[in-house]
Image (cartoon, grey):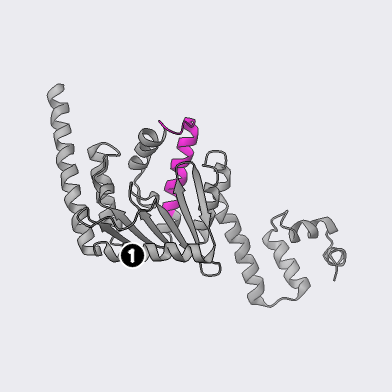
Amino acid sequence: MTGEQAAARVGWSAAKVSRIETAKTLPSEDDISILADLYKVDEATHQGARKLRHDAVQKGWWEKYGDSLDQGFGVFVGLEAEATTLRNWEPQVIPGLLQIEDYARALMENTMQPIVQIPPTWQRDRLEVRMRRQQMHLFSKDPLQLLAVLDEGTLGRRVAAPDVMSRQLQHLLKISELGHIEIRVISRMTPSPVNSAPFVHFKFDDFPDTVYLEVLEGSRYLSDVQQVYYYERVFDHLMGVALDEGSSRHLINEHLRSWQAAACLDQEKESASQ
């Protein structure tokens, strides 16, 4: 039947049917049920359409922050929402999905802000988005699989005060115990394994893989099969030269003790100055 015929049978305007079919309007659950009855679809198709609507509502939460995010980062959040597995290489700082709030705040204020000047409200929005992403993707009923390879330098680099660094490494140890999260560290004693900036390899159930490259002047996304395969091999190599999970936790714990000692020293200096 035509759009006009469908609209007439359910008592709608033809414009409403057209807006739904061209994705100009999000249909209500009742709309979906009415159309499912009209088109005589089976129950599985009907429920599948309702689930698509539910997911569309849930996965568009970041759009209200659009003005505050880096150009192109909305694409990243959208890919992250659809992904089943993230493979993340990070040679400089703790990955965003593994950051505690105070570490993320210090990173934005002390490291990024001197280079990229943004309004304070944008910083608050970006911090809120980062924390919400963690809750949705790592602590939900159906979390994604996260494989993170870190350079040891990320554990010892002072991004924030020693007490914040201590809590950040404690968080890494705790979260690394979760079954869907694997954290590996490449020791500084390991010869430089690869000359690559940070990247994220997204894997999906129903779509081709995509790679996100983080560069100073913006974001790049690769979907070419050969290019994605290259980064897949790079990550496999990084996993191969990294410490195993147990040894990685031991190394994180060593750095944690160093930061705890530094935090105690700071407290002593502060007490002496009062």
Residue 241 as seen in the image, left or right of residue 268: right
Using the rendered view, name the quadrant where residue 239 is placed.
bottom left
- Residue 57 counted in the magenta span: no
Depth check, front residue: 35 or 85: 85
Q: Position of residue 184 (x, y in %)?
A: 28, 60
Residue 20 as seen in the image, left or right of residue 11: left
Quadrant of the snapshot with the C terminus: top left
Q: Which residue is mark 1?
A: 237
Depth check, front residue: 212 or 1: 212
Residue 156 lies, with reference to residue 138, above or below; the image says above
Residue occupying image coordinates x 26% and y 42%: 157
Residue 169 lies, with reference to residue 263, above or below; the image says below
Magenta stretch, overall SS? helix
Specify start and end residues of the magenta stretch as a single range.
114-135
Q: Position of residue 115 (x, y in %)?
A: 42, 33
Q: Amino acid at mark 1?
A: His
Residue 266 visible in image: yes
Residue occupying image coordinates x 82% and y 65%: 10
